[in-house]
Amino acid sequence: MATAIRQSGDEPKARTRVVAVSGGIGSGKTTVCRIMLGLGATLFNADEVAKYLMEHDDALRAALKTAFGDEAYGPDGKLNRIYLASRVFSSEANRQRINAIVHPHVAAAFHDAVRRARESGAPLLVHESALITEVDHRDEFDAIVIVESPRDIRLQRVARRDSTASNAVAARADLQPSAEAYRAVADYIIVNDGSLDDLTQRVTDVVQAILDTEISGTGLNDAGHAGAQDGGV
């Protein structure tokens, strides 16, 4: 059974560890983050923050309309997700365009979340994102955790979850970074192809290993690339 995360050593408040969790579509990164949340971590979900900002940030709304047309928003003013997805997932150029527009706004929100977590003395802040291999500021994270799962399992999960045709899911997956690209930035790798109990134990072990690792003041793990750890569901 998983237990709450503990601070390493006897110091009253170690600096907040900032950890990125990423992986391909359907890999189970959200499940991993929920387990971490249950262990006492604070969660920053980059995709959910992006969705919120695209609905409520006036400057971002204007930029999206300029890039993708007024159809990006419906008559009710809400984001037209179906239309935007059809544009974004239809080409690499459109995917890069929307990322360039949205990511700076999400980054600003993330920096604010880090500040608040450190002010509150939170032991761990988890940044969940599908595109961590494209983040330029590697030194903002004490560790990067990559969640892996076999491609066929990932596609089945997403097709069931989103009621989407498997070929449409495959097209979205093909636009994401490759398994090799994810592995190249990983400090820890959790393979999600077994039971939830196994996954919970592996996540607990990885979280405790992160908290027990000495870190520098810059946010980067002093140990550098700590090595991949496979396991879990």
Image (cartoon, helix red, strand yellow):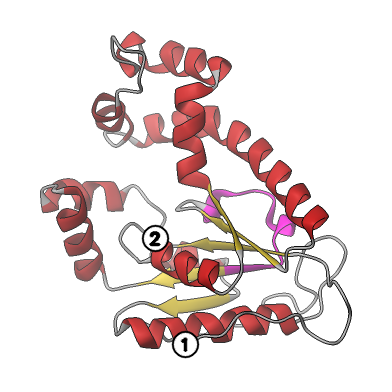
In the image, taking residue 188 as reference, residue 71 lies left or right, namely: left
Residue at 86%, 86% (x, y): give it.
10
Residue carrying label 1: 201
| Residues packed near mark 2 inside 10 Å, few (<14), some (14 to 19) or many (20 plus) | some
The three-letter amino acid code for the residue at tag 1 is: Gln
Height in image: 123 above or below 83? Answer: below
Mark 2: which secondary structure? loop
Residue 231 in the image, given as x and y percentages of width and height: 42, 86
Height in image: 145 above or below 67? Answer: below
| Residues packed near mark 1 inside 10 Å, few (<14), some (14 to 19) or many (20 plus) | some
17 and 153: which is toward the camera: 17
The three-letter amino acid code for the residue at tag 2 is: Ser
Residue 70 in the image, given as x and y percentages of width and height: 35, 9
Whether the residues at callouts 2 and 1 have beta carbons within 8 Å, the answer is: no
Any part of residue 98 in sight: yes
218 and 46: which is toward the camera: 46
Residue at 53%, 70% (x, y): give it.
36
Residue at 34%, 81% (x, y): give it.
196
In the image, taking residue 124 as reference, residue 175 lies left or right, namely: left
Residue 141 is inside the magenta segment? yes
Residue 194 in the image, given as x and y percentages of width and height: 29, 84
Residue 93 is inside the magenta segment? no
In the image, taking residue 207 as reference, residue 122 lies left or right, namely: right
Residue carrying label 2: 178
Residue 9 in the image, given as x and y percentages of width and height: 83, 87
Mark 1: which secondary structure? helix
Q: Which one is earlier in the sequence, the residue at label 2 or at label 1?
A: 2
